[in-house]
Amino acid sequence: MPTYQDALSAEPSEFLAFASEMIAAATDLATQQTDYAAEVAEINRHWQDTANEAFNGEAGNVDAHLAQVIGEVTAAAGGLAAAGAQMLAECTVLKAADAALKATGFTVQPAPLVTLGPSQRTAIAMAGPFGGFIEAVLQAQAMAGTLGLQSMTALVNAADATAGAALSQAAELLKPLDDKTSGTDRDLQSHAVAEDHSTGGTEEEEAAAEEEAEEEPQEATTEEEQESTEQEPREPTRPPSGQPTTPGTPTGMEDLAQPEMPDFDDPWGAAELPGTDDVSGGLASGGGLGAGGAGGGLGAGSGVGGLATGIGTAPQGGMGGGAMVGAATGGVGAAGRGKGAGGGMMGAGGGRGAGSAPDDETTRESTLTEDPDEDVWGIAEAADDRYE
Amino acid sequence: MTVHMDVEAVRTGGIGLRGLAPNGQAASRRVERPASTAADRNRGFATGEAGRRWQAALAAVTAGLEHRLTWQGDQVVGSADDVEAVDQEARTRFGGIQSRFATGPTR
């Protein structure tokens, strides 16, 4: 809010000059609008496709924006010109009143307050008995001058407040267009460049592919959201390399489908018994005497020996050693260390044991009571008698 | 629908839009000094400071207009470039097909 002194020193004509330049600015924008429309029309004369339709939609937005800005600038200029003219008039009157009061000898203080000046006080003093009357008249004039100056100052303030509010509102109405400069590269890249469609599918397939491409960003977003919410890592479900998977078994057949097996680290590796206390290992490697006899009885009675020999695993081989003498001996012995040459039923068991079991059979105690000096089985003379 | 483009004319139009873009700044530059002078020579007046803000808002508008016209010019030139590239690619493709017909099938 301007004070009395501000109003006295103001140059409201500058507001008028400002308003005049506003009009000129609106004219500049109108020229810009005209040139722009001409350029767009020239482009449209040489271009017709859907991209051109999109361009014209965009050009329409710019044209409407320009028209709106021109209107707002013109309105602001008109309001400022009117307010500036009013303030100019009021300030002119204010200055004239101030000058008139000072010319008659009054002193005008910044309040504004009109008081008697030195020359007036001298005149009152020289008036003698009429001094009181003259002073009263001058005081009344000073009072009226003060009221007049205050009124005019208030008018200037009111005009300034109105003009300032209108101009501020006009400034808020000026909204710039959204800046699309940052997306220029992406927009340009989004244009479909020539591609060889000779290997492509039908138009329907291409349209579907385009639709999928449009949906990809959204899907990618949802996948990212899911990944962000699911903190559990995904473990691969593929079996370890080199390890065939067990085929599925029918429901209720789980017990029959998987025979009991000792815990080997690798069922496809070399058949080695894990230790001397293992039952199957004992049966297979229990020497050429006791273990072989037990295997023979079991294999002959149940017929499992045939299956076991064919499979060739350590425990089943041990059982089958007696039942299928020739097969078990030859097969296992050939794969092992050539111990299958012992011959006979017991030799078969021993051969299997030698082929796969550890060589610490000597630490196992035999349950047979026999005289070690008596060669009951005639194996003492064998060249590869392991008990020698 | 009809698809037509005079590539060079459209490219020239896009360049013309780019050249037209800065002209809007003249409007805000025109009122910059009067706004400042009016505010400086009318101290204490709210209208003076409001005039400064109004000029700044107009400068933002003209700047946005310049960016938008520049962007439109880029889009138009890019469209012309794209159409030219498509035409060039199709021409190359058909030229290759023609040369294969001329040389006959190969195994």
Image (cartoon, coloured by chain):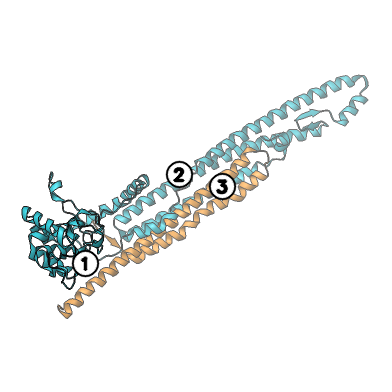
Q: Colour of chain A?
A: cyan
Residue A2 in view (yes/no): yes
- Judged from the image, the secondary structure of the residue bearing numbered disc 1 is loop
Q: Could you tell whether A258 is left or right of A277 in the image?
A: left
Which residue does the image show at 77% across and 24% down from the upper left? A143
Q: Amino acid at mark 2?
A: Gln
Against A379, residue A129 (above or below) is above
Image marks 3 and 1: residues in contact by CB distance under 8 Å: no
Amino acid beneath label 3 = Ala
Query: Disc 3, disc 2: CB below 8 Å?
Result: no
Disc 1: CA contacts within 10 A as few (<14), some (14-19) or many (>=20): few
- Mark 2 is surrounded, within 10 Å at the Cα level, by few (under 14), some (14 to 19) or many (20 or more) other residues, namely some
Image disc number at residue B56: 3
Q: Which residue is mark 1?
A: A387
Q: Secondary structure at mark 2?
A: helix
Tell me which residue sits at (36%, 60%) in the image: A189
The chain whose colour is orange is B
The chain letter for the residue carrying disc 2 is A
Q: Which residue lies under the disc numbered 2?
A: A68
Q: State which chain disc 1 sits on.
A: A
